[in-house]
Amino acid sequence: MKALHCAIKRQYLDLIQAGTKNTEYRDMSVYWVQRLVVIPAGTDIQQYRADIISGKVEPTFQKYTHIVFHCEGDTVTLPILGIKTYRGHHLFAIALDNKPDKKSGSKPKIRTAGNLPTS
């Protein structure tokens, strides 16, 4: 399991946990290009980002299986359904699998700092 770790504000974490927010958007900045995209060796990152935005390059995304959201000591881990680009808005869209469990109907659980396992 390759997990993408992201900080998130409480209001959005609550929406994700409730199942009403099922896509996480991140700016198509150099930082997020480096984290989400497989960059060919020797490539200038600024130019590669510009090529993604302009549509000259179709990015290959890292093979993340899960996303771990962190907020004030709490975490939520969810499967990632896919990542795509919204070039017109210079955004990456990360599709989340946060629907209630089909068998139990339970929603994604928030692990708080108080209920994390200790080593």
Image (spheres, rainbow, N blue to C red):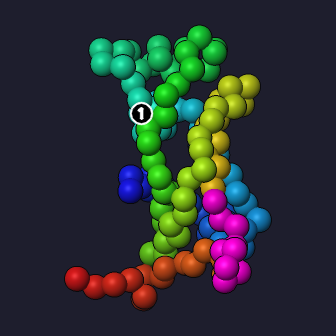
- Residue 47 locus on image (x, y percent): 47, 14
Q: Is residue 53 above or below residue 72?
A: above
Residue 102 inside the magenta-drawn segment:
yes
Q: Is residue 81 above or below residue 46?
A: below
Residue located at (34% from left, 84% from top): 117
- Residue 115 locus on image (x, y percent): 43, 88
Residue located at (50% from left, 57% from top): 67
Question: Is residue 69 in view from this perspective?
Answer: no
Residue at the far front in the pictured view: 103
- Residue 13 locus on image (x, y percent): 62, 67
Question: Is residue 89 in view from this perspective?
Answer: yes
- Disc 1 secondary structure class: helix
Residue at the far top in the pictured view: 56
Residue located at (48% from left, 82% from top): 112
Asked whether, in this view, residue 12 is left or right of residue 59, the answer is right
Residue at the far right in the pictured view: 20
Part of the protein shown in magenta = 97-105
Residue marked by disc 1: 34
Residue located at (63% from left, 56% from top): 96
